[in-house]
Image: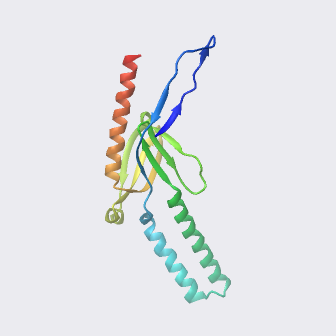
Amino acid sequence: MLKLYNITKAVNKETVFTKTTETKIIQSFKPGIWQYWLTFIILAFSIFLAFTAFGINTITGLSILSVSGLVIIYIILSVCTTGYVITNQGISVRKGPFSGKFKEINYGDINNISIKQGSMQKRFKIGNLTIVTGGVSRVFKGIRNPYQVKELINKEKASAYERRTLLRKIL
């Protein structure tokens, strides 16, 4: 569990309101590597071409080999370092090998959730989940079982709405 502490304001050196909220992690997941199956096939063919047609001793062969290798390494690093966390307060997203911060999406900001699956994505049981927040679309690629994740987000969004309305009635 993550604990978030809100800063309290003091009036005349007395604490007015103290609130400690705990963020409970509902589900944590990473994208699937199989979303890049076509890219891997093309890169494998280019590596094969670099070895057979141009040879490894030519500048063209070395260039094709090095660029293909760098693209493969970047794809693997980006898939391994991308993470999605569904909590009771929102969705945290960390994308790519060069981002060190999680980006938060609150449930109150989510307007629409849609799923897009190609034929090969259906075969691998993955899909792209698009979350629209205030005109900005965020695409989560390579999500395993995207319909279950969508239902989980909608359920958590509804419970967050209920908590907010209950809190408004109390206060």
What colour-coding does the image apply?
Answer: rainbow
Location of residue 64 by image quarter = bottom right
Q: Quadrant of the C terminus?
A: top left
Give residue 75's position: percent from left, percent from top.
Answer: 53, 64
Q: Is residue 69 left or right of residue 167?
A: right
Q: Is residue 53 left or right of residue 107?
A: right
Q: Please, is residue 5 above or below residue 12 in the view? A: below
Give residue 111's position: percent from left, percent from top.
Answer: 40, 38
Name the residue nearer the viewer: 14 or 146: 14
Name the residue nearer the viewer: 60 or 149: 149
Report the residue that reaches farthest toward the top: 12
Q: Is residue 62 left or right of residue 5?
A: right
The residue sitting at 52% across, 65% down in the picture is 76
Report the residue that reaches farthest toward the right: 59
Name the residue nearer the viewer: 7 or 128: 7
Q: Is residue 127 left or right of residue 97?
A: left
The residue sitting at 52% across, 75% down in the picture is 43
Give residue 117's position: percent from left, percent from top.
Answer: 35, 58
Q: Please, is residue 40 above or below residue 21 in the view? A: below
Name the residue nearer the viewer: 72 or 61: 72
Q: Please, is residue 6 above or below residue 46 in the view? A: above
Give residue 47's position: percent from left, percent from top.
Answer: 55, 80
The number of discs equals 0
The residue sitting at 35% across, 61% down in the picture is 118
